[in-house]
Image (spheres, rainbow, N blue to C red):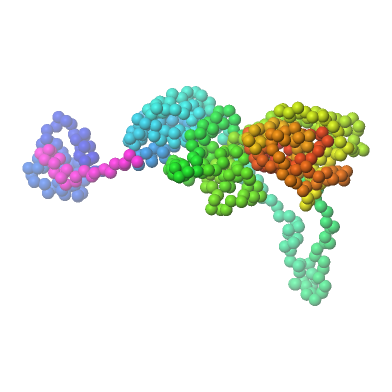
């Protein structure tokens, strides 16, 4: 206790009506015998000891008040940004001055005091940084525009506590389930060592006759079985990677608004300076936290916009980093936080394209397939496919060649394999979809085309009849040396190769396709290369493709 605190406590304890002389007599009784203060009082002049006012003056002179160092406004601003309201605190009550209040009300009042000490209470400074860090149930209810700190705090206090309690009840129930799942995963037993591995690690001398290490000069027993003849493993069907569903509704709108608040500057001197300021501001607010949908990261000037099919390594379009295909050197790659942000944003904003699933019968004549099933498959591939939306459908002419479904590029010859009815039924994951794509012409014009999607097709292709109808809109072909080998052995040279941008489901990628006659079976074959480029995920039960 400081001397000043002791003196104030003494005066509170002694009645106000007590005379100065009586207070002076009582003062010594409050001092600890033998203490520094007791020795100091004993050494005072007699006249001073008899006057309480004189004692007060002498005590202040002996132990003057220490000057308290007050934080600066910048330090108060730092404290304001560090003060977070935890999710678990929502819907709970705390005691303030012996009264129970809602935890988020007490926190909001504290933030208002800090804003006043930081000198920003009359402005919007720090409001957005604090708002984005609010727990989601509260953030979605306070709005996004506030004139100043009092208005922001009022919006927090005005939130309906009944709705907030319901939201928190759901969150706690979900948390219980998540904790149970996590506990079960932790208790999962370790994998047992395989008997084969144990046998491989056994001593070569184990089991020899005569004990010890056995006869080293005797012929060693055969330790390994003869290797079985090599058999190629059957090729597994293409399995799309498992991804989280994209954001929808209010969550998607909130993310888009957060992205819009961080301008993507041009690649100029001023733009680069502004980008540097954006990065510094981000790190001041968020520190070393992980990038997430709640902490959007500024984009490098001159790079492609978010969710444009860009490479996540360098931030530019025209290629991806699949199989480390990005040509950019390491010193030209974007910030790792921006790389992560581009992945998260593309994942969260990808759109689900509504498509129609169609059945498929025997594409190649299969002696085992029933004639009616063969006709059903022909009807789907030859006539049931909708025509392109912006061109008149050409005549549907059947060909003697089988419809190409699978392809493997070997040198300049592409083998096209047709799948029989029974095999196609067993490979459920390879059933095709009919969907709409947009081919981008050289002047930016978008040409809509109906495409038959098949993840078994190893090339993208357009029918020559379709290309002839839209050639004037999508531009000329490049030369191609590929020859397409049909399932019946016939070889069909490619008419040419088209290269440019293709749009699907809100995404845009740089791609190419071969042009050759399909015999009227389809207009465009949406093959595996395009599926990989778009990062497409098929949901066969729902009949959708997500990109």
Number of numbered discs overlaid on the protein picture: 0
Tell me the quarter of the image containing the N terminus: top left
Q: Which residue lies at the image location 31% right of the left edge and 42% below the top edge?
A: 71
Using the image as rendered, state which of residue 135 and residue 230 is in the foreground.
Answer: 230
Which residue: 80% across, 65% down?
A: 223
Q: Which quadrant of the structure image shows residue 216?
A: bottom right
Residue extending farthest to the right is: 367
- Image coords of residue 411 (percent x, y): 78, 52
Residue segment shown in magenta: 51-74
Of 113 and 489, the residue lying toward us: 489
Residue 526 drawn at (x, y percent): 73, 38
Q: Determine if residue 426 is in view.
A: no
Name of the residue lying farthest toward the bottom: 217
Q: Quadrant of the C terminus?
A: top right
User: What percent of the width, then of the height, locates residue 330?
Assistant: 56, 53
Point 76% across, 40% down: residue? 515
In this orientation, does residue 281 appear?
yes
Residue 82 magenta: no
Q: Is residue 481 left or right of residue 166?
A: right
Vertical position of residue 484 compared to residue 369: above or below: below
Q: Residue furthest left?
A: 47
| Residue 274 x %, y % | 44, 42
Query: What's the residue at 73%, 59% (across, down)?
Result: 198
Instruction: Say whether residue 94 is left or right of residue 245.
Output: left
Name which quarter of the figure residue 68 lies in: top left
Which of the two residues, 83 or 142, is positioned nearer the viewer here?
142
Q: Is residue 283 left or right of residue 238?
A: left
């Amino acid at each position: 206790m400081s001397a000043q605190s002791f003196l104030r406590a003494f005066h509170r304890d002694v009645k106000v009506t007590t005379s100065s002389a009586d207070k002076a007599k009582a003062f010594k009784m409050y001092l600890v015998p033998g203490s520094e203060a007791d020795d100091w009082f004993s050494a005072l002049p007699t006249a001073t000891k008899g006057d309480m006012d004189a004692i007060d003056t002498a005590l202040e002179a002996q132990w003057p008040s220490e000057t308290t160092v007050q934080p600066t406004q910048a330090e108060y601003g730092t404290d304001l940004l560090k003060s977070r309201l935890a999710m678990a605190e929502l819907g709970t009550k705390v005691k303030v001055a012996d009264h129970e209040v809602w935890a988020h009300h007490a926190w909001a009042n504290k933030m208002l005091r800090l804003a006043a000490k930081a000198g920003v209470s009359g402005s919007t400074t720090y409001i957005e940084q604090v708002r984005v860090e609010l727990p989601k149930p509260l953030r979605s209810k306070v709005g996004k525009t506030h004139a100043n700190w009092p208005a922001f705090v009022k919006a927090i206090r005005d939130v309906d506590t009944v709705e907030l309690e319901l939201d928190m009840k759901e969150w706690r129930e979900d948390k219980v389930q998540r904790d149970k799942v996590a506990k079960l995963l932790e208790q999962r037993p370790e994998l047992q060592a395989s008997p084969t591995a144990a046998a491989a690690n056994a001593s070569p001398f184990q089991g020899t006759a005569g004990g010890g290490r056995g006869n080293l000069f005797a012929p060693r027993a055969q330790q390994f079985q003869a290797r079985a003849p090599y058999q190629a493993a059957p090729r597994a069907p293409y399995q799309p990677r498992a991804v989280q569903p994209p954001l929808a509704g209010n969550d998607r709108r909130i993310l888009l608004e957060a992205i819009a608040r961080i301008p993507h500057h041009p690649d100029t001197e001023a733009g680069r300076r502004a980008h540097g300021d954006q990065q510094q501001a981000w790190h001041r607010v968020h520190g070393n936290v992980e990038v997430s949908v709640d902490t959007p990261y500024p984009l490098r000037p001159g790079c492609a916009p978010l969710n444009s099919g860009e490479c996540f390594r360098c931030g530019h379009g025209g290629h991806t980093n699949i199989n480390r295909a990005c040509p950019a050197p390491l010193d030209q790659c974007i910030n790792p936080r921006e790389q992560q942000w581009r992945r998260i944003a593309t994942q969260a904003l990808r759109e689900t394209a509504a498509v129609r699933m169609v059945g498929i019968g025997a594409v190649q004549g299969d002696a085992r397939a029933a004639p009616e099933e063969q006709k059903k498959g022909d009807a789907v591939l030859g006539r049931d496919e909708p025509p392109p939306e912006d061109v008149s459908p050409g005549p549907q002419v059947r060909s003697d060649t089988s419809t190409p479904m699978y392809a493997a590029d070997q040198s300049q010859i592409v083998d096209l394999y047709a799948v029989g009815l029974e095999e196609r039924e067993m490979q459920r994951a390879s059933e095709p979809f009919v969907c709409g794509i947009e081919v981008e012409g050289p002047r930016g014009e978008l040409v809509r085309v109906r495409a038959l999607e098949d993840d078994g097709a190893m090339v993208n292709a357009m029918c020559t009849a379709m290309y002839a109808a839209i050639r004037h809109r999508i531009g000329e072909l490049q030369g191609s040396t590929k020859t397409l080998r049909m399932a019946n052995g016939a070889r069909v040279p490619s008419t040419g190769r088209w290269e440019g941008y293709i749009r699907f489901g809100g995404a845009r990628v740089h791609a190419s396709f071969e042009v050759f006659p399909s015999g009227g079976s389809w207009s465009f074959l949406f093959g595996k290369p395009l599926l990989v480029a778009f990062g497409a995920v098929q949901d066969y039960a729902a009949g959708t493709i997500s990109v």
